[in-house]
Amino acid sequence: MKTSADPGFAFPDWAYKPESSPGSRQIQLWHFILELLRKEEYHDVIAWQGDYGEFVIKDPDEVARLWGARKCKPQMNYDKLSRALRYYYNKRILHKTKGKRFTYKFNFNKLVLVNYPFIDMGSGRVPQSAPPVPTGSSHFRFPPSTPSDVLSSSEELRSPGMFSSVARRMARGSVSDCSDGTSANSELEEAVGADERGIGPERIYRGLLPPRLPHDSFFRIYPNPTGLGRHGPRVHPDSLSPFPVSPLPGPGGILAQNLSPALSMTPTPHLPYTPSPSMSSPMLGSHFSFNPEDMKHYLQAHTQSVYNYHLSPRAFLHYPSIIIPQPHRPTPEKPAAHHLHCPPLPLSHSLGQQLGGGDEREQHPSPFKFKLQPPPLGRKQRDSGSSLAAASSSSQSSSFTGSSQIINSPLAAGPPKIKVEPISDIESDEEVEVTDISEEDEIYHSDKDEHDDIFTPRAHHYHQLNNHHQANGNGSSLSAPPHSNPDEDPDDDEDVFKTPATPSISSLTFPLINLKSEPGQAAPISPCIPLKLRFKRRWSEDQKMEADGERDEAEDKKVRAEAEEEKREEAGRSMGEAENGGGRAGAGSVILGLMLPPPPTQRRASSELQRATAQLSLENTGC
DNA sequence: CTCGGAATCC
DNA sequence: GGATTCCGAG
């Protein structure tokens, strides 16, 4: 585990894939993309742009070339590379932003799952899209945003960055063939060097971004005293990185050292990914102060995080009576694309985006605790999909009986439109989450991938989804791929990409209740117990469901299973009320984070990620 | 440009 | 499993 020094250090970065790293020789394309994305040097080739997780390949040929160099596939071209990218669609690692050329969007949630299956995405959800925060500028930097990050990451990665821009150029130019050992790798390395130098735009961004959030102080991940001043865990202004967890290492620098990412993960199973500070509930945390002010901040932060990251509202349970100040919700409509003004809160953009869609939500307080819509069928399933879907749905519905109540609530609330459908496959992760707000996203598939602004109302959404599915089933045998319509996409994943939805305040306040519990009754207070129970039920149901249903996508299954496991643990914990005590390693994670003490730091994690990434790049050299 | 099937490689 | 390569289709 980590030493006290690393209290929180739980995971490396999120995207980091242990397997691929050190030992494994092959770098995965998405990882490579991420690498490029984080380097300023390549910002003219590929850069974050648009929504969270969205990036644009400005120079397809170059990217292909780089990729080819990395993989020693001189014949690589964009066509091939893009094919590889398309394979990620099914995996949900990536999505295509329709209508935008060479523009794709990462589904960080998925990535995390992929990389850290044991993590419970469901509840805590990874930082949704942790993409770059759109600052007004077009590109965001991925990881290294903070100086500290830079340092830490750079240090580990490589020696001092001595690479000069010249070198970079050279590298780039020279790259293409594998023959040259230096080629691709060198390029990346150089890039890293650049980062080290601190050339990153982050600084610039920093300037642009708002200073710091008050509530952030609350959540500082690092225990350090200094932490108070620091920005909170989510998207840090400092870091433009897409990952919410931006690394700002604490004062100490991130772990300096050599934790292997893998290791890091193990130790602190919980929280790490939780993007939101929420997880670090002050109450539990050792450093929580009871100042009203702090509390306020905390709550606010929490709310925000919830909004942004789909965190479970459970955290709020602690303060049932407290009304959380709403994070700033700018215009409900669509805050202009992304610009973020993040004056008040850096989150704004995320909120804003979501808000657009969120309006509806507000109207219906409790809708989203479960998945309303059927998951996208796998492409393969599409063919047979319809039949399967039906079957699954039926089975699920039965299983859901317990939760049927829940279902009612939404209806009661009002939005008749929503069809509650058992989720057939979709990502169970989400299902599992039940409690989380995040669901909304899922539900909401719409993406603003293409249109930031445009959101379909939720109810609408649901309908669409349903229809969608049908349409797919009926219509073309193929059924449109999930992405075909930005708005429609049923993928949860997309949510991921999307900015988190913002639940209504009310829901936030008593989210749990509303969410899962019975409709009418939402007794806001003292939900804890009920919650737990519900949770349990939920589980059982889920398990059951799983058992019965053969769900489709293998992935989903996987995820689900994992999620369940996590849930169980979580449930166990919650029931037991155990804090993180020993940490069960492994699972639980995010969810746990909600209840647990201050999470480690995501920043760290991210920084690690960066490092890892860097290392990977290095390691994967040698053609 | 984008999509995704199919075969193939590692 | 994760591409890579090729390719027809939209």
Image (tube, coloured by chain):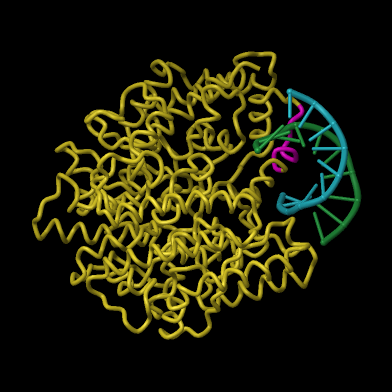
Chain colours: A yellow, B cyan, C green
Q: Quadrant of residue A374?
A: bottom right
Give the dominant element type of the magenta stretch: helix, strand or loop: helix
Eyeballing the image, is A391 above or below A581? below
Asked whether A81 falls inside the magenta stretch, the response is: yes
How many numbered callouts? 0
Q: Quadrant of residue A309?
A: bottom left
Asked whether A121 falls inside the magenta stretch, the response is: no
Eyeballing the image, is A13 above or below A312? above
Q: With C10 as the anchor, is A147 left or right in this view?
A: left
The residue under the point 41% across, 80% down is A409
Q: Quadrant of residue A23?
A: top right
- Residue A211 in sight in this render: no
Q: Nearer the viewer, residue A100 or A459?
A: A459
Q: With A449 as the anchor, is A121 left or right in this view?
A: left
User: x%, y% of residue A432?
Assistant: 47, 59
Q: With A390 as the anchor, is A518 left or right in this view?
A: left
Q: Which residues are magenta?
A: A75-82
- Residue A330 in sight in this render: yes
The residue under the point 33% across, 39% down is A603
User: x%, y% of residue A26?
Assistant: 62, 26
Q: Nearer the viewer, residue A200 or A255?
A: A255
Eyeballing the image, is A25 above or below A372? above
User: x%, y% of residue A99?
Assistant: 65, 59
Quadrant occupied by the N terminus of chain A: top left
Quadrant occupied by the C terminus of chain A: top right
Q: Nearer the viewer, residue A514 or A402?
A: A402
